[in-house]
Image: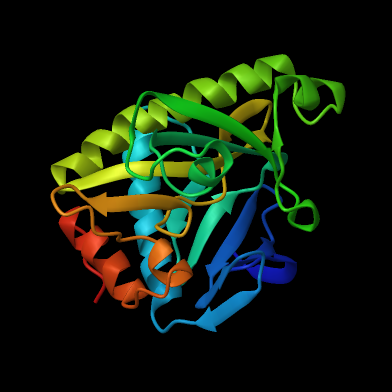
Amino acid sequence: MEKREELYSGKAKSVYATDDPDLLILLFRNDTSAFDGRKIEQLDRKGMVNNKFNAFIMQKLEAAGIPTHFQALLSDQESSVKRLEMIPVECVVRNIAAGSICRRLGVKEGMDLDPPTFEFFLKDDALHDPMINEYHINSFGWATPDQVDKMKKLTFQVNDVLKRLFMDGGMLLVDYKLEFGVFRGQVILGDEFTPDGCRLWDKDTREKLDKDRFRQNLGNVVQSYEVVGRRLGLTFD
């Protein structure tokens, strides 16, 4: 597979075309940003850690019967993935109250949410990813009703798999976002699953082990990502 032109450069990843029209290459960079890009830093080893972490999680989800775009690790910072027609909607599940839901609804961080909440957000940086609902998605044609149902079903299946996985590693899966796309007519999981896009706390101490360490200036961001990986059985050397 031959790497070709860059198609997209996001906050922490770049996407490249290949000589195979069905495959792309994801480059996980060391860039780290928060607050719509108002805070940006380069963190050594982050691209490598997220690339390997994402590959591990995607393979766990595939083994559980959840279709993903992941194909293979290519290098420390690159993976090959299926080329999807991305749906511009983020699916967010919250098992514990943290982040924006606390600000919006005035609830206390750390409240257990049973059942978990589910929210849709429009993927649009210029609009700051506003919350939307199924009526918006249908009216504006961002996804079909069948695709919406499939995204919700897969998002909760991911929750079932990963809550257990992280709990076995002594961690709580607080919340996370997923993005989906269409490949040959099938809705499948795209983008990434790393500590950049979810919240993970130590089960006993509730120490934050995710990107909130960067947002809240807690330090040891990449080191905490590596702690998460090692608790799941990953190595990064």
At x 64% / y 69%, what residue is drawn?
Answer: 3
Task: Please say whether residue 56 is visible from this viewpoint.
Answer: yes
In the image, is residue 63 above or below residue 127?
A: above
Q: Position of residue 126 (x, y in %)?
A: 80, 57
Q: Residue furthest front?
A: 106
Q: Position of residue 237 (x, y in %)?
A: 24, 77
At x 38% / y 79%, what residue is drawn?
Answer: 45
For the residue pair 175 and 222, the one nearer the viewer reads as 175
Task: Please say whether residue 64 is visible from this viewpoint.
Answer: no
In the image, is residue 133 above or below residue 24?
A: above
At x 61% / y 65%, what residue is drawn?
Answer: 35
At x 20% / y 53%, what residue is drawn?
Answer: 232
Q: Name the image quarter holding residue 219.
A: bottom left
Q: Is residue 68 left or right of residue 130?
A: left
For the residue pair 131 and 137, the one nearer the viewer reads as 131
For the residue pair 237 and 178, the one nearer the viewer reads as 178
For the residue pair 102 and 179, the one nearer the viewer reads as 102
In the image, is residue 35 above or below residue 64?
A: below
For the N terminus, which image quadrant? bottom right
